[in-house]
Amino acid sequence: MLKPFLLSLTLVSLARAAPIEPPMVQLPAGEFRMGGGPPDMGGEAQANSALPIHTVRVPAFKLGKYEVTVREFRRFVEATGYKAPQECNHQPGPDWFPGPTAGSWDHNALSDSEYQPVACIGWADAEAYAKWLSAQTGKSYRLPTEAEWEYAARAGQDSVYPFGADANQVCAFANVSDRTAEFAAQSRLGASYIGFMGGYLSCDDGAGFSSIVGLYKPNAWGLHDMIGNANEYVQDCWTADYQGAPSDGSARLNGNCDERVLRGGSWHWRDVSASGRGAMPLSWVGAIEGFRLAQSLDRPADKDTAASSLAFEGELQQAQVVERAQRLQRPPFPAQPQGLTLQQDGAAVRLSWTANPEPGITGYHVFRSDSHGDTLRRIASDVQGLSYTDRDAPARKHDYAVVAVNRSLFGAYSESVSSADTTHALPGLIQAEDFNQMAQAVMGRIKPQEDADDPAAGFNLTGPAGVAKGSWTEYGISVPRAGLYRLQLRYAAPRDSQGLQLSVDGEALATQGFTSTGGPRVWQTLSGPTLTLPAGQHVLRVAALDEGWKLNWLRLDAQAH
């Protein structure tokens, strides 16, 4: 009597482990201009990586309508016992992703649906999935080439974005860092997109982190989430630019194959053009990287859509209906508070603002940055009034903003206000973060164990690829008497660099190049040139002549005559 029961269990188990063939879109052969577009958020090197623009001829192929989901990847793991990574860069906090922690494709802090893109996997895991699906179905499933991906993303368009040139439309087509993302980051993580990778868009796509696939408008060829949601691995090895790139749509495998190309951006980025590109090493496992599959047409394949594809799409549509209904039930974001002012009395800073006119406001949150233009962090919640006094303000120049709160959401930030400029008396040390004005400057934190010679740790000037070329910071200095002042710098650099230029009141005084310290977290103190400084109050500017380095502090000491 047990045999029918055991047979039934076996059939159920096999059904659960049977592959789900992804819904595919067949794309025609064609020619397009690959590369170009605006600089992305990765600095000059990343922007230049999409050059030169070149013509590529792409054969016909199929591409997944959606990014591969947790549900699809689950079938692979159940069928094969595949040992997927158990650590993932997925536990974000105030400084976003600090490093790998326990987490996997089916159990991590940022995924909560079977129909979200599978993440917390690496390039090799995506490749293993494609090979398994090909073996199970007899079809040529694989990762797309970089050229195929961009051809598909553009969908016959030659504009900045796959849907045109208007960035205000991004939230209708993509899950990116927007108003909901900022709310989710602040409320769940204590993190912010302000001062991080270009900020966030003022539109709203309804998702704070990863989203169920297919919720946003498809491009002209019926492909969803080509921009945003998950960064997508492709076949190609990383190259610094398109010099010598194939023109036939094939993968480029003669570059740095320890790193593989990523395309499309993610929920963690503000917006990415169809030409934007990046890469991660093979060892990388993160919360914003996933993939979609391509299918070659070089062997016979059923013209009819696989039954598993139809069933999956039906289940996906049900999940989409539930998710859309939940989003419609959310109240609107409160309006931006108006009239924020600041009064400073020594170490105390008093903020005042006007009341929001809409009903349902339950209070106000107060935010402050650690330095001018840096990330905003909440310092007070549900303030019941129209003023707040900060008695623990940083000594350096910094910013404030307030938001209005209803029963479940806080709204847009008010216009920010700043504390007074900081003036540094010479001779003395100037921390890199103690600037009064800046352009493209990004602050990072130095952990105590990172720099044994600077146990106070603190902040540094940095960026995705180190300090960005063309960025600058300005410091107020007070020179007691005219004379010679010797410069010292504490910096880190993974490679030799042109370094920086120093100027006072707009007059260039000196440049300082950097030699490699051995890595971006290896710090050294450098004795630089002697500067001739006039007496009085001045503005010292530090301008980046090249990218790739980081700055912890600089020091100016008077030289004996």
Image: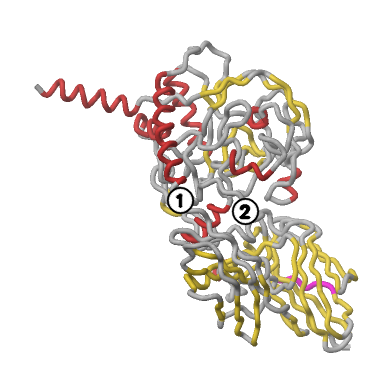
Q: Which residue is mark 2?
A: 200
Amino acid residing under circle 1: Arg
19 w.r.t. 469: above or below: above
Q: Residue at x 64, y 63 (%)?
A: 522
Left or right side of 410 for 413: right
Q: Nearer the viewer, residue 501 or 380?
A: 380
Q: Quadrant of residue 282?
A: top right
Based on the picture, tell me whether residue 527 belongs to the magenta stretch.
Answer: yes
Residue 91, how many percent across, how many down? Answer: 47, 55
Q: Report whether 553 appears left or right of 324.
A: right
**x, y percent for residue 391:** 56, 83
In the rendered structure, which segment of residues is drawn in magenta? 525-529
Residue position marked by numbered label 1 in the rendering:
330
* Residue 190 visible here: yes
Q: Nearer the viewer, residue 83 or 210?
A: 210
Label 2 or label 1, whichever lies nearer to me, is 1
Residue type marked 2: Tyr
Q: Find the distance from the CA under tag 2 to the CA under tag 1.
A: 20 Å
At horizontal 66% and vertical 41% (from top left) the residue drawn is 277
Q: Nearer the viewer, residue 319 or 280?
A: 319
Location of residue 463 (image quadrant): bottom right
